[in-house]
Image: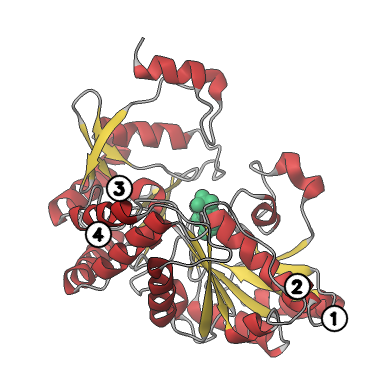
Amino acid sequence: MSISERDARSVWHPYTRHFDAPKFPVITGASGSYLHLETGEKILDGISSWWVNTHGHSHPFILNKLQDAAQEMQQVMFAGFTHPRAVELAERILALYGRGQGKAFFSDNGSTAVEVALKMAFQYWQNQGKRKCKLIAFHGSYHGDTFGAMAVSARGLFNEPFWPFLFEVQFIPSPIKGQAGVLSELSKLYALHGDEIAGIIFEPMVQGAGGMIFHDAELLNSVLSFVKERNGLIIVDEVMTGFGRTGKLFGSHHLQVPPDIACLSKGLTGGMLPLGLTLAADKVFAAFNSPELSRALLHGHSFTGNVLSSAVALASLELLLQDDTTENIRRISSSQREFSQRASHPLFHNVRSLGTLVAMEVGSGDGTYASPLKESLHQYFFERKILLRPLGNTLYVLPPYCVTDDELNYVHESILQLPRKLNL
Ligand SMILES: Cc1ncc(COP(=O)(O)O)c(C=O)c1O
């Protein structure tokens, strides 16, 4: 029996309607910008394998650091112990992120980084004897699939079975250009619930899974200043926007208002191993720094502070800061910007780019995640040996930084040929 057939018998896949799912292609290797299929074909990874892979697959520098670490130790418990790589990673990330972040809390992925941020935020207030149980989030937000992360994500198809279990969140419009009404919604919200609001959680500059919604930096700053002036905590989810994706090292580096809590994952390890970090400003940590155990953050996971994940994160950071990578980010950003300016077909709407990301809506039909166009777009690119996985009819390209000009041009040209080839 083939691997695909065995898979169909035994494996339950994420985000998958198995009822009529086709047999999945089998990936047997990956290097640089390419995934290698069992059939011998190579597929250009136009979305960095769910946005995690920053420097390309099987990067030899990261692999070497992984091997070195693995020979020393692989995993140690992180309560009551520490190890050099976790300490160094915390120091480096805090220095790089800046903006008043003083402590790094380790976890396993983007959703856990968000869960930890939510617990920090609610307990921050509780430890000071204040009951603030409401958070603000933007319409269309997505922050992960665990319960807290689902609660601060827009209500929709993906979390509908769990609505009765999700805590209450106040959703306001995203601060996109021309949406100044968001400020009056915010002040109405504060007039009604101001005393109960713990803070705001958002992705800085771009809401990724929600449909690559781009923010207006000035408007977002006004929203954040409003919340900050009223003592609300500013929680940034940089799971997608971190590590150069938006053209700056972190999405919040586009903004004037600094966060109190920041969530990192995905590109943190260059996409080689899972890891989450939640950064906290000194004032947040201070609220937990008490002789009473009940005021401590009593949260952890078996693999918290994993040695190998820390080692690859350090290696990935080292690569990120090299001049070559900075130049690649600049090169990809200008190619994506240039493409966004010439992709002018009536089928393409709201073509936009920020840093290494370009996005657009294709057609005018159903814009939801379940849009039937999603599958035909995916298929069209796969036949051209490109991996793109549209969010509904939102098509986007977010490549690893090793992608060459020729490879990126090939993706751009394939997009431009779409209307003719799909008869749209
Ligand atoms: C902004 C954001 N936050 C959180 C998550 C959840 O991360 P993970 O899938 O690693 O749990 C994602 C995943 O796509 C994300 O895009």
Verify CB contact (< 8 Å) between mark 4 and mark 2.
no
Which of disc 4 and disc 1 is earlier in sequence? Answer: 1
Screen quadrant of the N terminus: top left
Q: How many marks?
A: 4
Q: Residue at x 65, y 41 (%)?
A: 157
**Quarter location, residue 340:** bottom left
Indicate left or right for 286 with 417 as reference.
Answer: right
Q: Which mark is residue 46?
A: 3
**Disc 4 to disc 3, C-alpha distance:** 11 Å
Q: Which mark is residue 401?
A: 4
State the SS at label 2: helix
Q: Position of residue 346 (x, y in %)?
A: 37, 49
Q: Residue at x 50, y 43 (%)?
A: 392
**Quarter location, residue 251:** bottom left
352 or 253: nearer the viewer: 253
Verify CB contact (< 8 Å) between mark 1 and mark 2.
no
